[in-house]
Amino acid sequence: MAGADKPNVVMTRWWWVRHAPVRNDGGNIYGQSDIACDTSDTYVFNAVAKVLPRTAVWYSSNLMRTHQTAEAIWAAGFPRPASMKWEADLAEQNLGRWQGMNRAQFIASRPVGTSWFADINEPAPGGESFMDLYNRTRRTIERINAEAGGQDIIAVAHGGTIKAALGLALDGQPERGLSFDIDNCSVTRLDYFATPERKVWRLPMVNQQPWIADAAHAAMHQPAGPEVKKLA
């Protein structure tokens, strides 16, 4: 019979949503600091709610800005799920003593062309390296793929976490994930295909911004890396 010899492919679709913008950081690095985000732009959340699958398993980090973002999506008319699991290992990188430092001054102190706060193997003093973030994100994704394989997964997380997920999808090369911009409230979809013999990822969309046609909502892009202007 046609197709009888084809392997059984399980596809798991990850819909990553970065949290809403943080306005009360004072221009400082916040990392894992548990501070609130701004969910007042209902136009943005209405647009995001329209592109997410209605029957999905929801996950978030343990930080309040991801929970507030999820609440704003549900308030925009998206059916509230029965539950949302909090995963501490999906939190942003712990930037240790860099947290609270002026972002522009810090970026100006780094080598030209730096795409993240530091080399992927350099831990923040009293905190983590990007590789630490990558490894805990990878472990969590692999566990959830085993637990919820074949389903749609909506994960409300952070810029660093989503970059780590991209690095995993790009053949386990974390530094490649740092090449992408991940704007606030953007949607990134990563599809995971698994058979007994092979496991592969596909990247249907990265940093999707369904509200982007309206320039009035451009504040969802918050400079955080080399584009941050140096202080005079």
Image (cartoon, rainbow, N blue to C red):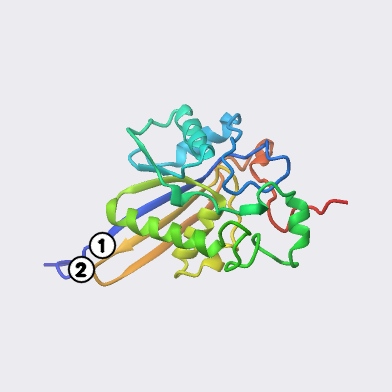
Q: Tag 1: Cα neighbours inside 10 Å, few (<14), some, or many (≥20)? A: some
Q: Based on the displayed image, in which of its 4 quarters is residue 95 positioned?
A: bottom right
How far across and down, in percent of the image, does residue 109 sit? 77, 61
In the rendered image, the vertical position of residue 13 relative to residue 70, given as above or below: below
Q: In which quadrant is the N terminus drawn?
A: bottom left
Q: Amino acid at mark 2?
A: Lys
Q: Based on the displayed image, in which of its 4 quarters is residue 34 positioned?
A: top right
How far across and down, in percent of the image, does residue 145 sit? 32, 56
Q: Secondary structure at mark 1?
A: loop
- Is 54 or 166 nearer to us in this picture? 166
In this rendering, which labeled residue sits more in front, label 1 or label 2? Answer: 1
- Is 167 or 88 nearer to us in this picture? 88
How far across and down, in percent of the image, does residue 130 sit? 56, 62
Q: Based on the displayed image, in which of its 4 quarters is residue 51 positioned?
A: top left
Asked if marks 1 and 2 touch (Cβ < 8 Å), the reply is yes
- Is 196 or 230 nearer to us in this picture? 230
In the rendered image, the residue lying farthest to the right is 232
How far across and down, in percent of the image, does residue 57 sit? 34, 43
Q: Secondary structure at mark 2?
A: loop
Q: Which mark is residue 28?
A: none
Residue 118 as seen in the image, left or right of residue 10 = right
Q: Amino acid at mark 1?
A: Val
Q: At 33% from the left edge and 40% from the top edge, which residue is drawn?
A: 55
Residue 29 as seen in the image, left or right of residue 156 = right
Which residue corresponds to mark 2? Answer: 6
In the rendered image, the vertical position of residue 71 relative to residue 124, given as above or below: above
User: How many dots with numbers?
Assistant: 2
Q: At 67% from the left edge and 48% from the top edge, which residue is drawn?
A: 29
Q: At 56% from the left edge and 59% from the top edge, which residue is drawn?
A: 128
Which residue corresponds to mark 1? Answer: 9
